Image: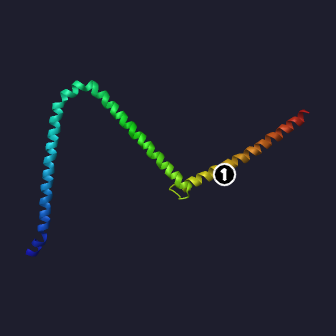
Amino acid sequence: MSQRLHESTPSTRQTVRFLAAATIGAALLGISGLTLTGTVIALIMATPVLIFFSPVLVPAGILVSLVTAGFLFSGGCGVAALTALSWIYNYVAGKHPPGADQLDYARSRIANKARDMKDRAKEYGQYVQHKAHEATQQVS
């Protein structure tokens, strides 16, 4: 019985770990509470100033957010362009980037369809030419 009780009790190392984690967690919780309290007090004190300057601050905030969105969109487009150029370079260099098989398959399908359409157009042109020749023969 005493051996079973001894096995279920935590070791000294586990106890020290628990106490350290509890101490650090309590300290961080206290700091976050102080930060929240300070933020609320600062917001309460700054509210009259924000209301007074809101005719200037609101358009300025909108302008800043639009400029930020523009820069982020521009950067995203630049990254997309660089990625596309890198993929094209790797494809042309024969390094077989992801999706190259699909591109080759699509290119062959389009080439086959274009060849079929060319043959159909040639046949239809010959058919129209033959019909026109028959029509001129009947009129004469």
Q: Amino acid at mark 1?
A: Asn
Q: Secondary structure at mark 1?
A: helix
Residue 1 in sight in this render: no
Residue 131 versus residue 93: which sits nearer the camera? 93
Residue 4 horizontal/vertical position (percent): 11, 73
Structural crowding at the residue carrying mark 1, measured as other residues with C-alpha within 10 Å and reported as few (<14), some (14–19) or many (≥20): few
- By what rule are the colours in the image chosen? rainbow
Is 15 placed above or below 72 here? below
Residue 49 is left or right of residue 132, and the answer is: left
Residue 121 versus residue 93: which sits nearer the camera? 93
* The quadrant where residue 135 appears: top right
Number of numbered discs overlaid on the protein picture: 1
Residue at position x 39%, y 38% from top? 71
Residue 50 horizontal/vertical position (percent): 22, 28
Is 122 placed above or below 9 here? above
Is 18 placed above or below 89 here? below
* The quadrant where residue 140 appears: top right
Residue 122 is left or right of residue 45, and the answer is: right
Is 51 placed above or below 123 here? above
Residue 133 horizontal/vertical position (percent): 86, 38
Residue 34 versus residue 105: which sits nearer the camera? 34
Residue 26 horizontal/vertical position (percent): 13, 52
Residue 54 is left or right of residue 122, and the answer is: left
Residue at position x 58%, y 54% from top? 104
Residue at position x 55%, y 56% from top? 93
**Image quadrant where one finds the N terminus:** bottom left
Residue 127 is left or right of residue 83, and the answer is: right
Residue 18 versus residue 136: which sits nearer the camera? 18
Residue 114 in sight in this render: yes
* Residue tagged 1: 112
Residue at position x 80%, y 43% from top? 126
